[in-house]
Amino acid sequence: MASTHGACTPPNSGSAGSSGDPHMAFFNGGHADFRGRNNTVFCLLSALHITVNALFEDRIFVRWGGQIIYGSFMRGIFILAHSESTGADVRIAIMAEEPHTYRLCAADVTLASLKTDCALKSDDLDLGDISVELLPGLRLRTRASGQESTFTHRRLRKPIVNGTVAAPTDPARWFMDTSFRELANDASLSAKYGGGSLVVNDVYPHGIIGQSVDGTGTAVSGKLDEYDESLIFHTSAQAEGAIEGIFTDYIVSTPFGNDFKYSRFGAHGPVAPRNVSLLTGAKVTAKAGAFSGSIERHGAEDA
């Protein structure tokens, strides 16, 4: 069975995202796969005034061709956004199995206490320079700190739980895709949500995806899971070659945490971008408008 990596959306150098059994598309056009670790939160994006973390969860599922995949998906997204107008920190939690809703958290929480300590919301939120919008197609869009993020709730067709296909109501059916876009090319949105770029006060962002905003104009791609003809396939790629350090460097201890090696949230003074010359992945010149998305088409209900 051939790899399913392929272009599906046309982000430019200001766009990035992740989809399916996590396939990462970077801001500069590079791409890689990232398995993560079961029931562990990783930082996708860390900038001066915003952090986006994701909860990874192992899943076993059946692709359309019948191949059994031992992989992983994003089950939750946790956004910490600092309002430059009010000075307040806003915490937004989006759980895959809770479509049409999100949660507001007054403080950082544990994964175990998330659903008891955070208020469930089902309407749009406008706090001036931070907003949350519920969109058609099981999507939710946030805007803050010069960035627009879109999160899509999706369902697996045949997840396996305890040796059998999960019931339609099982939370294991749900996972999330992400899409990030800098607002630099939209003057009105930049004026409202701040700057239009994730680079603020010479602090360059980081995180698994965020580090690709490095100002080099170079697209770096990392390791991919190349699916074969075997009956059972285990994913293993951790974006090697496309990210600084190793995958465990991006683990945070709490949903809204910033305690990872490359944290940029609230940084003081200039922070340089990553050194692309030290990355071992394939490098090409980034092109505005180039296709850089990918999607898992063989395991989802809507594929």
Image: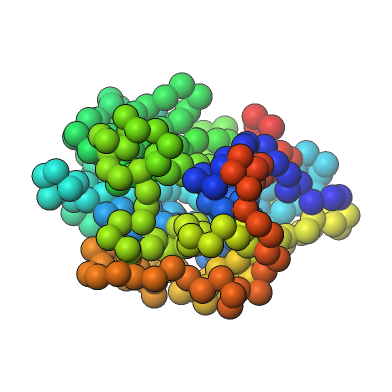
In the displayed orientation, state which residue is furthest to the top.
136
Task: Check the picture and name the quadrant holding the C terminus.
Answer: top right
Residue name at image x 60 percent, y 60 percent: 218
Question: Relative to 36, is 183 on the left or the right?
Answer: left
Determine whether 223 is above or below 118 in the image: below
Q: Going 24% across and 30% down the picture, which residue do you hit?
A: 125
58 left or right of 92 in image: right
Pick the front one: 300 or 226: 226
Q: Position of residue 70 (x, y in %)?
A: 68, 57
Please tell me in which quadrant of the rendered image residue 273 appears: bottom left
* Towards the viewer: 127 or 167: 127
Q: Is residue 33 above or below residue 248?
A: above
Is residue 173 visible from the viewing direction of this image? no
Q: Position of residue 267 (x, y in %)?
A: 26, 67
Percent position of residue 18, x then y: 56, 48
Give the residue at x 67% y 37%: 8
Residue name at image x 70 percent, y 66 percent = 282
Image position, residue 220 (x, y; %): 63, 62
